[in-house]
């Protein structure tokens, strides 16, 4: 696998332009040599998170970094949107209706809780959200998942 892949999405990547956004995220995964069902799973996850950041977070930009390192993929999302502690939504791992609100909000973060093997959220300098995800690609190919913290 190659080094890391970086892309920046601006306000032109509104949720109304999902096809173009998915294409760009797909290019990012392709450059990281991630294909098949694992690529599809990660494409949907990143697409959902980026759309949510632009639509609900009032962000004017989102940065996506994909770091393939051995059998592990690190995904980093940064944005200039409103502060949002993703922890409670990610921890809501159960299929219980209380885990995701009745209007379907927080589904992207719910997905993170099931796909990411580890994650971390922080607010940088009071101005930038950063969500770091770690995905064990070997586990995804085997179809297994572990609980994130």
Image (spheres, rainbow, N blue to C red):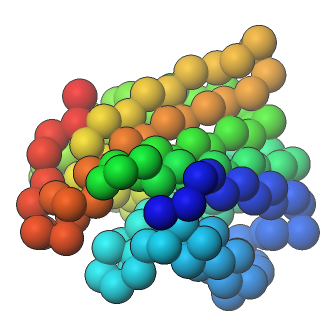
Please report the residue visible at 87 percent of the width from the left and 48 percent of the height from the top.
Answer: 60
User: Would residue 38 be found to the left or right of residue 65 on screen?
Assistant: left
> Up-down: is 77 above or below 103?
above
Q: Position of residue 146 (x, y in %)?
A: 13, 45
User: Would residue 1 be found to the left or right of residue 71 on screen?
Assistant: right
The answer to whether residue 1 shows anywhere in this view is: yes
Please report the residue visible at 20 percent of the width from the left and 60 percent of the height from the top.
Answer: 138
Please report the residue visible at 54 percent of the width from the left and 36 percent of the height from the top.
Answer: 131
> Up-down: is 66 above or below 140?
above
Q: Nearer the viewer, residue 27 or 83?
A: 27
Q: Nearer the viewer, residue 72 or 82?
A: 72
* Total numbered badges shown on the rendered structure: 0
Quarter of the rendering occupied by the C terminus: top left
**Quarter of the image where one finds residue 141:** bottom left
Q: Position of residue 94 (x, y in %)?
A: 14, 48
Q: Nearer the viewer, residue 72 or 121?
A: 72
Please report the residue visible at 80 percent of the width from the left and 56 percent of the height from the top.
Answer: 8
Instruction: Report the residue that reaches farthest toward the top.
Output: 125
Q: Position of residue 89 (x, y in %)?
A: 36, 39
The answer to whether residue 89 shows anywhere in this view is: no
> Up-down: is 121 above or below 114?
above
User: Would residue 45 be found to the left or right of residue 143 on screen?
Assistant: right
């Amino acid at each position: 696998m190659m080094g890391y892949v970086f892309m920046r999405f601006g306000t032109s990547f509104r949720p109304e332009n999902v096809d173009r956004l998915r294409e760009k995220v797909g290019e990012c995964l392709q450059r990281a040599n991630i294909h098949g069902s694992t690529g599809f799973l990660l494409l949907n996850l990143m697409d959902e998170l980026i759309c949510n950041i632009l639509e609900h977070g009032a962000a004017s930009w989102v940065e996506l970094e994909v770091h393939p390192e051995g059998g592990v993929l690190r995904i980093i999302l940064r944005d200039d949107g409103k502060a949002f502690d993703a922890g409670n939504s990610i921890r809501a791992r159960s299929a219980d209706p209380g885990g995701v609100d009745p209007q379907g909000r927080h589904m992207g973060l719910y997905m993170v809780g099931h796909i990411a093997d580890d994650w971390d959220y922080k607010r940088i300098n009071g101005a930038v959200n950063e969500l770091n995800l770690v995905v064990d690609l070997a586990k995804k190919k085997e179809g297994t998942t572990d609980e994130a913290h």
